[in-house]
Structures are given as structure tokens and as C-alpha cells.
Image (cartoon, helix red, strand yellow):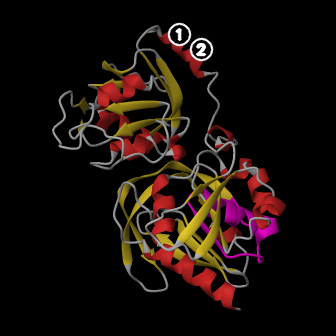
Amino acid sequence: MLEDGRVFYGKAFGALGEAMGEVCFNTGMTGYQEILTDPSYCGQIVTMTYPHIGNYGVNADDVESSRIQVAGFVVKDGTEIPSNYRSEASLNEYLQSAKIVGIQGIDTRALTRHIRDRGSMNGIISSNDLDDISLKKKMAEIPTMAGLDLVPKVTCKELYSWPDSSKRQEYNVVAIDFGIKHNILRLLSHHGCKTTIVPATTTVDEIMSINPDGVFLSNGPGDPSAVTYGINTIKDILGKKPIFGICLGHQLLSLAIGGSTYKLKFGHRGINHPVQNIETSEVEITSHNHGFSVDPDSLPSTANITHWNLNDNTVEGLKCTDIPAFSVQYHPEAGPGPHDSRYLFKKFVTMMDYAKKN
């Protein structure tokens, strides 16, 4: 059931019980395990628009965090018998083991169009309460995403390192964990970075005591304007160390330099979104997962927009002209998705290299 009263009936998928949260949709044909484990989906019920989900099963490698992060999962047809040499379990078994409630057999196209036309809204999946009145009462207790800080639910509790002994580590990076994905850490390591991941509430003094060559601002869930502690920390880092932000990190950097953010009608979630690099005029096919965007008119004169979304002309990237800092709204690390934008990790390394020599 959606908060506007629209009801979809289907078959229980995954665990039995109830799931509540903001209902959103992802247009990717593959990558469901990465989507399920992406911390940016915390507090959301994810609908997959592609009809057949679970075809290749799940495995221990294709994860973006230590657990499933979504509140609930909606598919048209969940495959019971996967077919892939890497498969270790079915999607249904995976959801059941994590006690994630899902539903299948509904018209996901109708649900997607409903959200697209009317905007994001909260919803409930229930296999044990089918009373409309009761569900509506429960719906009223679900907080809206606007103003909601979900970072405490996904950030690490204490700092840890992500080294890769097979690569030479030339750069010392501190990654502030607002809900970081594993593939970001893999790519930082691939580009010669020894990364220390710190909790979102880590102070600037604690960060600087690690003596980083650069600071990375991670992706994460919720309303960026509610993450005031993160914004204040970034303000204190500006100009002291090179900064690279992705997704929520991009929004927090924008807020730290004086910009503002707003909630999108239904967000961007998928692995085929066209983004234009303004500096090169090239179009990159990119992976997206965000429900908020940066207001271009709010940015100071010391920030240049570097990337635009070609679907709705929203801001997809910026760079500061007075300090070494840049960010993108989309996900260059993919996981899942295309690799068109992985050059941005090299850009971060180049920025750190320049700062070390000057």
C-alpha cells in the first residue's frame, strides 16, 4: 500500500512480515545484489522495473556493504532457480536469510508510473496485515525522507583501513563514511590509495591527525541538509586538503561551500543515465542513486558546474575554483553500472599528487 491509498496485491517474496519506507524504483536490468547492499538505499523500499530479477542468483562477492540495506524489495517475477556458475543461493533465500520483506507478482510498471507521475511517497509491504485501515494508521507513523538523517544507521562505528597489498600505496586518504560502498574503496585502492575509513561524526582534528593526502566524502542515504555535523566538518577541511565527493558527499560539499539542496520528484536510480561533461562535451553513461539534488542557482561564484544530467538538466558535478575540491552526484565507481566515469578517481590522485609537491 502507498500513502495515497493505492494498493497492489502480490505474492510474498523473501521474509514474511512488514516493511515500511519510501518507495522508489531502479531501472537497472542487472546488479540487484549491489543495489540491495548499497547503504544509500537505507530506509527505502526498492522496486525493480526490469521484470525478471534473480536470474543469476547471489554470491559473497557482489556486495557493496556488509549487509542488505533496503527496507523492502519489489519485483515483478523473482527467479526461484538461478543459473550462473557463481551463484551460491537464490535471491529469495538471500532475502529470507536477512529477514528482508518483499513482494512479487505485482505490476511494477504501473507502480513505477504511479511514483513517476505523483512523486516519491512512503509505502508498506505486509504479508500479515491485510486490513487497509490498519495499514493506513501504520503509514502515518513513517517519517518522510525530507529532513531525515539516516547516516547514523549506516556509518561505521570506528575507523578501519582498506589496504590492497597487491598495489603500491602512494597516497594516504581519509574517507568519511556516510554510507560508503565497497567498490569506491576498491577503486581508491586500485589507484594507489591506502584508505582509512572514519565514522561520519569524526572531527576535523581527528581527520588531520591521520595526515591524509586527501579526503573522500562518500555516498549515503537521507536528506543531506540534515547531516549538519558532516557539513561542519567539511567546512573545516576546505582548503586544507584535496577533497573528492560522490553522491551524498557531493551534496554535503555543496552545502559546505554555501549551496542548497532540494528533493527531486522521484529521484534518479538506474545504471543508464546520460550525463554531459561540460568541460569536454562528452556524454557519459552513468549509474545513479539519489533523491536530492543541488540547486545550481545557490552555488557561489567560486564553484563551477562540471556535469549536467541530460534527462532533466539537474546538476551532476562541480569543482571549486579557489580550493582543490570537486564532486559528482552520480556514481563513477558503478557497482552496478558502466565504467565511463572512472577517470574521476585518477583526477583525485592527480590533485593529491599536485598538493604533495606544492
Q: Position of residue 257 (x, y in %)?
A: 75, 69
Residue at 63% across, 68% down: 173
Q: Position of residue 138 (x, y in %)?
A: 58, 16
Badge 1 density bin: few <14, some 14–19, many ≥20, Cα 10 Å: few
Residue at 73% across, 49% down: 227
Residue 343's place in the image compared with 62, above or below, is below
Residues marked 2 and 1 touching at CB (< 8 Å) = yes
Residue placed furthest toward the bottom? 358
User: Viewer-proximal residue, 144 or 40?
Assistant: 40
Looking at the rendered structure, which numbered label has been put on residue 137? 2
Q: Residue 15: say if magenta.
A: no
Name the quadrant of the N terminus: top left
Residue at 39% across, 55% down: 335
Residue at 47% across, 26% down: 2
Residue 302's place in the image compared with 222, above or below, is below
Q: Amino acid at mark 1?
A: Ile
- Secondary structure category for the residue under label 2: helix
Check disc 1 and report the residue beneath it: 133
* Part of the protein shown in magenta: 235-260
Q: Residue 239: say if magenta.
A: yes
Examine the image and state in which quarter residue 231 appears.
bottom right
